[in-house]
Image (tube, helix red, strand yellow):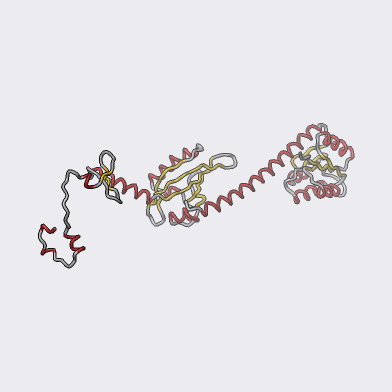
Amino acid sequence: MHQETILLIDDEVSIRESLSSFLIDEGYRVFTAEDGDIGLDIYFREEIDIVLTDLRMPVMDGLEVMTAIHRHDPDVPMVVVSGAGKKQDVIKALQMGAKDYITKPITDLDMIGHVIEKALENRYLIRENRRYRRRLEKSEARYRTITEQIAEGVFTVDAVENLTFANPAFCKMLGYSQAELCSMNLVELATSDSFTHITRETLSIQKGLISRYEIQLISKNGTRVHVELACSPMYDDSNQYSGSIAVVRDITKLIELRKKYQKFLKREKSESKDILSICANCKNVRGDDETWKQVEEFFSHVVFSHGICPDCCEKLYPDIDINDLDDEDL
């Protein structure tokens, strides 16, 4: 377990000894310095988690110390423990990153402990947030790489349907550039009925649900593109809904096939009364009892005779004039 390290800089021996003793009892590792010059030497030599410093000291005052530390690492928490200083000194100390300003004489050591604990906790949260953001940036970069390479269209919108990202596949699907799409709202890309559908589905997405639905978008050249959207919600740092991400599939050809199939079903229903299943290989016929029979057996009630039709006769015997043949020959 990491033991937090404190640097205590004060020219008063009694302050250094009393605070150092208290902080060691609290479980901290403590370094002390009687002036700012020695304090900075310790700071750059050791790994210091928090600095407690006086302002008025010989050789180098507390403000110079804080300026040097803040320039090196703005995240290091600093607490000023000083006598009644000037107002501008207090303001300057706070600008340099001081988490608190404690005036002497110190009457409550527990209050010092509380201030240090909160300052260290705040430092931990800042560093964790930075690490989280770095991981998020790496994930975002990876996500961008993936979405730019996949065949499906991908776009993101904010809470009011303004496009914030469009991958190359989606740009190609509608004929717009990425810059053009990211300056538009979905209301400009969808038909009127489709945008009404979008706003209705957005209500579900805002509740954390994943939504899949079909709409029509309008390409740059004015043609309608039938698409299927699979939308998921996105949230900001405060876990509030900030928009959605959609994976887009062009189903225009699928819609055309659906229409053709529906027409076929209607035609079949109106025109086809009796349908026979015939094997494409042996030409056997499937009967009502689901058994397959040879043509002659299936049509046993019909008498067959062999002949040749005029078209086949012309193909097989091109030298024969069909007009010279009797009907019986055919």
Q: Position of residue 132 (x, y in %)?
A: 64, 45
The tally of labels here is 0
Question: Going by the image, does 157 lie left or right of 2?
Answer: left
Q: Is residue 317 above or below residue 210?
A: below
Q: Position of residue 109 (x, y in %)?
A: 81, 33
Q: Is residue 27 visible?
A: yes
Q: Position of residue 269 (x, y in %)?
A: 25, 43
Q: Quadrant of the N terminus?
A: top right
Q: Position of residue 195 (x, y in %)?
A: 41, 45
Question: Going by the image, does 216 lie left or right of 102?
Answer: left
Q: Please name whichever residue, 97 or 243, is drawn nearer the observer in this view of the structure.
A: 243
Quadrant of the rendered image containing residue 321: bottom left
Q: Quadrant of the C terminus?
A: bottom left
Question: Going by the image, does 76 lie left or right of 199?
Answer: right
> Which residue is drawn at the image coordinates 38% and 44% (left, top)?
193
Q: Please name whichever residue, 199 or 132, is drawn nearer the observer in this view of the structure.
A: 132
